[in-house]
């Protein structure tokens, strides 16, 4: 299948299997980090500092989510930019994807269970901040967060970004996209440097410091839809795959920076930039070169299954682990995994999918043509 044919499928809202697999590749490292690496971190660091540093890099799954989400959302906006009801359809579908599982999580942590107070009270971020997706501004200023809600900071950054992206991408910056892209890719790493130097805000979850990650995805979406750029990438797809593979090796090697003096700051400031660029490059390579072994891995059924349910897995994995109070660490992991994946399957089948279909009932309309019913891709 050619690059042009795959772009047509993307514009039609088709679920390319590589995209679900990449979601699976993003969620599994996050589970590995929170469920295995962090609980045994002192032991792992004493056993092998280099292995510990590599395992700690599992946080990069969040950045892969950012890049992929930027790619999918920008693609939707670009493909339907002429729709007169663009904003209404976009936000209706976005709400159908994000709000149900998220509000369910907030409800659970806000209820007293037995003799225990609501779990959200174990943190310092108010419920009102979560309801308006500003919780990361509390945590980036140093507020303690309830364990079950630790994944929600990235959701806040995404929703803040996508609140503004439709207007900026479709209505304001169409003629000045190149200048805007330079700002979006250069300013965040510099802001991360300022955060690290001042100590006033966290370089990890402060919104202006993290907007380059989804924007690398936006840049990838623009590139594959541009006829000349897409044709260039298609002609050099073999080299693109090798460059992506080498870049992923560089990302893995960058984990060892944390063992050097000030290496953690270097990884957070400019290492994230390299990582996000590599993820965007690998995403394009997987889509344009389906015969590449990396694309074959992304098409695996197991990763696809996890990818389609990755949103629930991401939101609820800490909550499940919190409630499974078993003394034996291996048994606790096993029971938590069974419960989490079972709940994810139930949620996708009977909760999330029906609501997504309701959101998809709001079509993108095109003047003089039938409305498109392409499904929400993220």
Image (spheres, helix red, strand yellow):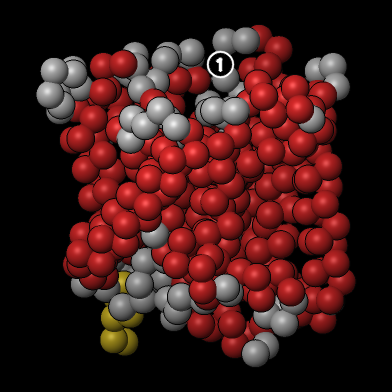
Classed neighbour count for the residue bearing mark 1: other residues with Cα under 10 Å, few (<14), some (14–19), many (≥20)? many
Report the side of 160 relative to 272 (left or right): left
The quarter of the rendered structure image containing the N terminus is bottom right
Picture mark count: 1
Q: Is residue 157 above or below residue 252?
A: above
Q: Where is residue 117 in the image (x, y as percent from the top left)?
A: 18, 17
Closest to the observer: 2 or 371?
A: 2
Closest to the observer: 87 or 208?
A: 208
Task: Give me the residue at 27% from left, 48% from top.
Answer: 101
Task: Give me the residue at 38% from left, 36% from top.
Answer: 321
Q: In which quarter of the image is residue 373?
A: bottom left
Q: Position of residue 175 (x, y in %)?
A: 59, 58
Task: Give me the residue at 58% from left, 74% from top.
Answer: 299
The quarter of the rendered structure image containing the C terminus is bottom left
- On the image, numbered disc 1 is attached to which residue? 201
Q: Position of residue 98 (x, y in %)?
A: 31, 50
Q: Can residue 198 be seen in this view?
A: yes
Q: Is residue 292 above or below residue 130?
A: below
Q: In this view, does 187 lie above or below 341?
A: above
Task: Give me the residue at 63% from left, 26% from top.
Answer: 41
Report the side of 175 relative to 185 (left or right): left
Q: Can residue 314 be seen in this view?
A: no
Secondary structure of the residue carrying numbered label 1:
loop
Closest to the observer: 77 or 326?
A: 326
Q: Position of residue 226 (x, y in %)?
A: 65, 73
């Amino acid at each position: 299948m050619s690059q042009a044919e795959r772009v047509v499928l993307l514009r039609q809202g088709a679920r390319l299997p590589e995209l679900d697999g990449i979601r699976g590749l993003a969620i599994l490292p996050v589970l590995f980090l929170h469920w295995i690496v962090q609980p045994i971190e002192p032991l792992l660091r004493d056993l092998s500092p280099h292995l510990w540093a590599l395992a700690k890099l599992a946080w990069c799954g969040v950045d892969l989510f950012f890049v992929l989400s930027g790619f999918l959302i920008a693609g939707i906006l670009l493909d339907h930019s002429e729709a007169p009801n663009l904003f209404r359809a976009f936000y209706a579908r976005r709400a159908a994807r994000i709000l149900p599982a998220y509000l369910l999580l907030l409800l659970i942590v806000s209820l007293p269970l037995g003799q225990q107070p609501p779990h959200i009270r174990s943190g310092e971020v108010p419920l009102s901040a979560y309801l308006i997706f500003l919780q990361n501004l509390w945590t980036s200023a140093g507020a303690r967060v309830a364990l079950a809600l630790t994944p929600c900071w990235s959701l806040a950054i995404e929703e803040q970004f996508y609140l503004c992206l439709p207007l900026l991408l479709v209505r304001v910056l169409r003629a000045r996209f190149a200048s805007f892209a330079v700002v979006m890719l250069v300013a965040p790493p510099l802001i991360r440097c300022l955060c690290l130097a001042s100590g006033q805000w966290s370089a990890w979850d402060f919104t202006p410091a993290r907007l380059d990650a989804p924007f690398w995805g936006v840049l990838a979406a623009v590139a594959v839809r541009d006829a000349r750029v897409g044709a260039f990438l298609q002609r050099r797809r073999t080299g693109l795959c090798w460059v992506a593979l080498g870049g992923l090796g560089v990302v893995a090697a960058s984990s060892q920076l944390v063992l050097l003096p000030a290496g953690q700051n270097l990884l957070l400031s400019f290492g994230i930039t390299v990582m996000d660029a590599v993820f965007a490059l690998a995403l394009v390579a997987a889509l344009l070169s389906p015969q590449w072994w990396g694309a074959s891995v992304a098409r695996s059924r197991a990763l696809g299954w996890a990818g389609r349910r990755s949103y629930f897995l991401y939101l609820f994995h800490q909550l499940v682990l919190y409630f499974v109070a078993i003394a034996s660490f291996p048994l606790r992991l096993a029971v938590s995994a069974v419960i989490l994946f079972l709940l994810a399957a139930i949620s996708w089948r009977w909760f999330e999918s029906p609501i997504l279909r309701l959101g998809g009932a709001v079509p993108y309309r095109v003047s003089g043509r039938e409305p498109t019913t392409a499904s929400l891709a993220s």
